[in-house]
Amino acid sequence: MSIERSGAQRALRFSGTVAGLLDKLGLSPEEVLVTRDGAVLTEADRVSAKDRIRILSVISGG
C-alpha cells in the first residue's frame, strides 16, 4: 500500500484493519485520521495492499 503522512510517501506491505495499521506504524488512533479516497476510515475498517492511504494529524485548540 501507499501511505502519505506529512507530505512524505512510503510503501508498506500490509492488509488488515486500520487499528492494526496504526499499531504497526506506532501511531495512536486518538492523534490521527486515516483516509482512503477522501473518506475517513474507522479503526475497524479493513485496508489492503492496493490501497492509497493518507494519515492526517489531528490538531485541537481552544
Image: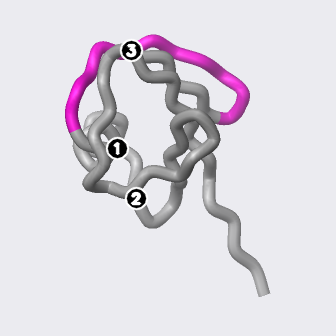
Badge 3 crowding class, 10 Å Cα cut-off, few under 14, some 14 to 19, many 20 or more, is few
In terms of secondary structure, where does tag 3 sit?
loop
Q: Nearer the viewer, mark 1 or mark 3?
A: 3
Q: Please, is residue 48 above or below residue 25 in the view?
A: above
Name the amino acid, label 1: Leu
Name the amino acid, label 3: Lys
In terms of secondary structure, where does tag 2 sit?
loop
Q: Nearer the viewer, mark 3 or mark 2?
A: 3
Name the amino acid, label 2: Pro
* Residue with the mark numbered 1: 22
Residue 55 lies in quadrant: top right
* Residue with the mark numbered 3: 50
Q: Please, is residue 61 above or below residue 45 in the view?
A: below
Q: Which mark is residue 29?
A: 2
Name the residue located 57 percent from the left edge and 47 percent from the top edge. Answer: 39
Residues in magenta?
6-16
Residue nearest the viewer, comparing 9 with 16: 16
Residue 36 in picture, x, y percent from top left: 52, 36
Quarter of the image with the C terminus is bottom right
Residue nearest the viewer, comparing 25 with 4: 4
Q: Marks 1/3: CA distance?
A: 17 Å
Q: Marks 3/2: CA distance?
A: 22 Å
Is 2 on the left or on the right of 12, as rendered? right
Q: Are marks 1 and 3 in contact (CB under 8 Å)?
A: no
Q: Do the residues labelled 3 and 2 touch (CB within 8 Å)?
A: no
Q: Do the residues labelled 1 and 2 touch (CB within 8 Å)?
A: yes
Badge 2 crowding class, 10 Å Cα cut-off, few under 14, some 14 to 19, many 20 or more, is some
Q: Which residue lies furthest to the right in this view?
A: 62
Name the residue located 62 percent from the left edge and 47 percent from the top edge. Answer: 56
Name the residue located 32 percent from the left edge and 33 percent from the top edge. Answer: 47
Is 47 on the left or on the right of 15, as rendered? right
